[in-house]
Image: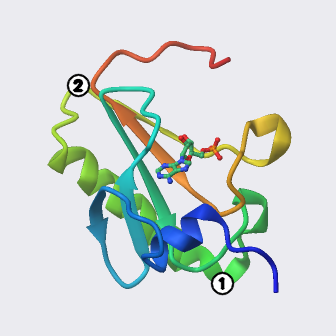
Amino acid sequence: MAQKTIFQRIIDREIPADVVFEDDQCLAFRDIAPQAPVHVLVIPKKPIKSWAEIGEGDGPLIVHITNVIRDLAVELQLTDGYRVVCNCGDDGGQTVDHLHFHLLGGRPMRWPPG
Ligand code: AMP
């Protein structure tokens, strides 16, 4: 059996995380190495490896996650705006092979990203 990713181990409660939201479809927790005052990762519980692996049938799940991110931004008081990032593959800078969305806020963001 393939090795579990660190995020699967968080879903399975094998390692701790600072969880800020959970429902039957997704989990949101604070990034262990925050790049902004607010840095939360939102992940599906379904083990999708990356943005490139999202399937046709995953539409409702992805819409649900976008709604969760929108509502979390309000709950976390990101009233001046925020950034949502999904790194995909090596060139995208993805380091964990479980689809995840970064919600970053609490400071002005620069563009272009590195
Ligand atoms: P990416 O580079 O887009 O794949 O993002 C992976 C993110 O997961 C990085 O920002 C890491 O800091 C974060 N991360 C890795 N391990 C953990 C963990 N155990 N708990 C919370 N965040 C983690």
Q: Quadrant of residue 29?
A: bottom left
- Write the residue at 37% across / 85% down: 24
x and y, in percent, of residue 113 in the image: 63, 19
Q: Nearer the viewer, residue 4 or 42?
A: 4
Query: Marks 1 and 2: in contact by CB < 8 Å?
Result: no
- Write the residue at 66% across / 84% down: 57
**Which comes sooner in the sequence, label 2 or label 1?**
1
Horizontal arrangement in the rendering, residue 19 relative to residue 45 (left or right) = left
Give the Cα distance between marks 2 and 1. Answer: 34 Å
How many discs mark residues in the rendered view? 2
At label 2, the amino acid type is: Asp
Vertical position of residue 13 compared to residue 65: above or below = below
Residue under pointer 1: 57
Vertical position of residue 83 compared to residue 113: above or below = below
Q: Residues within 10 Å of mark 1 (few under 14, many from 20)?
A: few
The quarter of the rendered structure image containing the N terminus is bottom right
Vertical position of residue 67 compared to residue 113: above or below = below
Q: Nearer the viewer, residue 9 or 46?
A: 9
x and y, in percent, of residue 49 in the image: 73, 66
Horizontal arrangement in the rendering, residue 2 relative to residue 65 (left or right) = right
Residue under pointer 2: 80
The quarter of the rendered structure image containing the C terminus is top right
- Write the residue at 43% across / 44% down: 31
Ligand 1 under 8 Å from disc 2 Cβ: no
Q: Secondary structure at mark 1?
A: helix
x and y, in percent, of residue 7 in the image: 56, 64
